[in-house]
Image: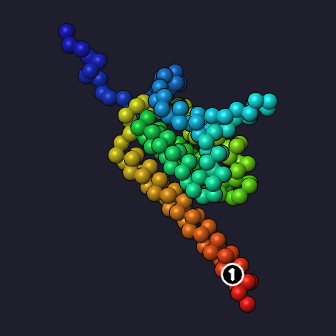
Amino acid sequence: MENFENLQPQKSRARSALTKERRKAVEIEESLETLSYYLDDWIKIPVVGWRFGLDALIGLVPNVGDMATSVLSFYILVAGVRYGVPKITLIRMAFNIWLDYVVCAIPFIGDTFDFVWKSNKQNIDLLRTRATGKDKGTTGDYLFVGLIILALIAILVASILVSLFIIGVFFKEIWDLFNF
């Protein structure tokens, strides 16, 4: 007798093709969970129980720190493609990274925001709830995320250039002030 299970058509990678229980059964790589933990929840303040991670600490270095942690967050975004996450969810994950970077670029306000906004943890939660299975990404999905990452990198570079321009104008004004 032949095995008829292999002759059945392949199931679509659409989220609706998986039951809720099956989606929960998709295991997320431990390295992704660990990365999210270290970036967002690594250190616990004993008395109040607040948690923060390297994202908040490294983010204290203006622009460079926020850019470094955003690049680390791209790894989770690309993993979303590997797990077959729908494009709309990939956009949401990219928005979380963008919002974390843009708000954290604002001095003082951004540093406080980094202790509250856990973009990597949110992205892991999205990945966990929206994944259809490992190695389900298509070439089109990778190109889509590649374009998103290029756009995010362009925003990162533009913000650094704007910061350098502002610093340059500031020091020029100071120089002109002392140079009668």
Give the residue at the far right of this rendering: 47
Q: Position of residue 48 (x, y in %)?
A: 79, 32
Residue marked by disc 1: 175
Q: Residue at x 52, y 56 (%)?
A: 152
Which residue occupies the foreground of this view, 62 or 127?
Answer: 62
Which residue occupies the foreground of this view, 121 or 55?
Answer: 55
Q: Is residue 77 left or right of residue 116?
A: left
Q: Residue at x 43, y 35 (%)?
A: 83
Q: Residue at x 63, y 57 (%)?
A: 62
Q: What amino acid type should be assigned to the residue bearing mark 1? A: Trp
Judge whether 12 appears above or below 106 on screen. above
Q: Is residue 96 left or right of residue 75?
A: right
Quadrant for the N terminus, please: top left
Q: Position of residue 139 (x, y in %)?
A: 34, 46
Answer whether residue 154 is visible to the viewer in this image: yes
The residue tagged with tag 1: helix, strand or loop? Answer: helix
Give the residue at the far left of this rendering: 1
